[in-house]
């Protein structure tokens, strides 16, 4: 009798546990089906004071420095995103003028368990150097004990502003897929089926490589949409780019789709002034915000088998 009771209790408990586990699993599936984008990480590039040997201060101009432009647009973009998608949480990698190395930035993004990473930067190119002959002078040299005189040109170097301007959006290079796979594998929040990533396990490798491909596709889609939105505003778009050989470390190191937006050239006075203005920063934030909204809409559509989700 006693044994029967114990058996019955064990069976009942087991049944209850499996039932609970089942409904919990069901619930997570439901949440996943509803939310394609839960947390966006915005990374204002650079930051802090220039330090010798650090070499990572970013671009400077008479009007604004890259680190300040990144932070200003990040705050505006956060607001734009929160207003247009109230169910999405927005996290910034920095909210003050501090310098973090890229490893810290990537760790912050991964710790926040973001599912989209947007880094904000500005471009900068050197002025173009021109050499012009302005005079000639006579120089005397000795050759085999003999004095030789000859006329040589005198040059003057002058610089003109580099005409490069416009926006660019970067995604990580295909050549950096291995690094991206590693980042995804090691961040156990991405795939609950991979708790201990073993790079030698073929099944895990396959799962991670498929996920990397999916993230690359999503990053490319968002990058193209951002550039499209900039064009709609009348900006010059230099397109979606990849830096294959050198790579962009932070884009490979975050376990999520990731883009880096070059908002314009600080070396181009007209663009530097635009980027330094409140209106310019707001426009840039709105272009990126609209692109993210379109990106989310497209992911939601895909997840619901082509049936558009009701607007919330
Ligand atoms: Zn930069």
Image (tube, grey):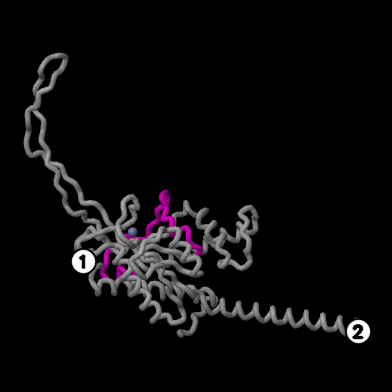
Quadrant of residue 304 in the image? bottom right
Front residue of 30/24: it is 24
How much space separates mark 2 and mark 1, taking CA atoms?
Answer: 84 Å
Q: How many numbered tags mark residues here?
A: 2
Q: Say which mark, if any, is on residue 72.
A: none
Q: Residues within 10 Å of mark 1 (few under 14, many from 20)?
A: some
- Percent across and percent down for residue 299 are 49, 73
**Which residue is at 45% across, 84% downward?**
311
Q: Nearer the viewer, mark 2 or mark 1?
A: 2
Span highlighted in magenta in the image: 228-255
Q: Say which mark, if any, is on residue 2.
A: 2
Residue for badge 1:
273
Magenta stretch encompasses residue 86:
no
Asked if the residue at label 2 sits under 8 Å from ligand 1, the reply is no
Magenta stretch encompasses residue 234:
yes
- Percent across and percent down for residue 121 are 33, 62
């Amino acid at each position: 009798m006693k044994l029967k009771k114990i058996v019955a209790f064990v069976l009942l408990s087991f049944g209850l546990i499996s039932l609970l586990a089942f409904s919990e699993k069901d619930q997570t599936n439901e949440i996943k089906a509803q939310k394609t984008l839960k947390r966006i990480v915005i990374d204002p590039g650079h930051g802090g004071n220039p330090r010798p040997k650090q070499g990572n201060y970013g671009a400077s101009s008479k009007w604004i420095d890259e680190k300040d432009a990144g932070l200003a647009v990040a705050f505006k973009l956060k607001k734009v995103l929160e207003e247009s998608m109230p169910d999405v949480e927005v996290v910034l990698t920095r909210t003050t003028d501090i310098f973090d190395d890229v490893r810290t930035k990537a760790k912050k993004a991964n710790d926040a368990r973001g599912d989209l990473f947007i880094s904000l930067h500005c471009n900068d190119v050197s002025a173009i150097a021109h050499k012009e002959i302005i005079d000639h002078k006579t120089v005397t040299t000795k050759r085999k004990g003999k004095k030789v005189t000859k006329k040589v040109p005198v040059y003057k170097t002058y610089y003109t502003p580099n005409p490069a301007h416009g926006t660019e959006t970067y995604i990580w290079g295909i050549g950096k897929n291995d690094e991206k796979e590693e980042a995804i594998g090691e961040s156990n929040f991405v795939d609950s089926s991979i708790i201990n990533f073993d790079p030698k396990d073929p099944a895990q490798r396959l799962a991670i490589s498929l996920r990397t491909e999916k993230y690359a596709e999503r990053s490319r889609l968002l990058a193209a949409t951002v550039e499209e939105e900039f064009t709609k505003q009348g900006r010059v778009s230099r397109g979606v780019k990849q830096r294959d050989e050198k790579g962009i470390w932070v884009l490979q190191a975050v376990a999520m789709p990731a883009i880096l937006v070059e908002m314009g050239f600080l070396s181009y006075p007209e663009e530097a002034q635009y980027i330094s203005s409140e209106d310019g920063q707001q426009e840039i934030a709105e272009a990126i915000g609209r692109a993210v909204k379109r990106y989310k809409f497209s992911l939601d559509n895909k997840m619901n088998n082509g049936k558009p989700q009701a607007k919330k």
